[in-house]
Amino acid sequence: MSSLLLLIPIALGLGFFYLVAFLWTLRTRQYDDLEGAAARILFDDEPLENDAHERR
């Protein structure tokens, strides 16, 4: 029984922490472009002009 007196506040504290972290990610708009990151990985970046001259 005494272990519950320790574990319940820890569980509630962790739950509150993760809720605050999730709300922070929503507020900073980190979930706005879910498809853009998935499509961006499929395409190569355009080489910079300096890179093209150095490779020759």
Image (cartoon, rainbow, N blue to C red):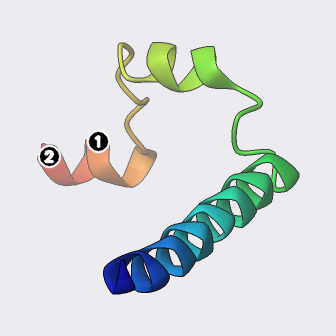
Looking at the image, residue 27 sits to the left or right of residue 2; the answer is right
Rendering coords of residue 48 (x, y %): 42, 44
Q: Nearer the viewer, residue 56 or 38?
A: 38
Rendering coords of residue 20 (x, y %): 74, 65
| Quadrant in which residue 50 is drawn | bottom left
**Badge 1 amino acid:** Ala
Q: Nearer the viewer, residue 13 or 33?
A: 13
Per the image, the residue denoted by label 2 is: 55
Per the image, the residue denoted by label 1 is: 52
Q: Is residue 23 above or below residue 4?
A: above
Q: Is residue 7 above or below residue 50?
A: below
Say which residue appears at 46% left-offset and 18% top-offset.
38
Disc 1 secondary structure class:
helix
Q: Nearer the viewer, residue 1 or 35?
A: 1
Label 2 close to label 1 by CB (< 8 Å): yes
Task: Check the image and name the residue furthest to the front.
Answer: 1
Looking at the image, residue 27 sits to the left or right of residue 55; the answer is right
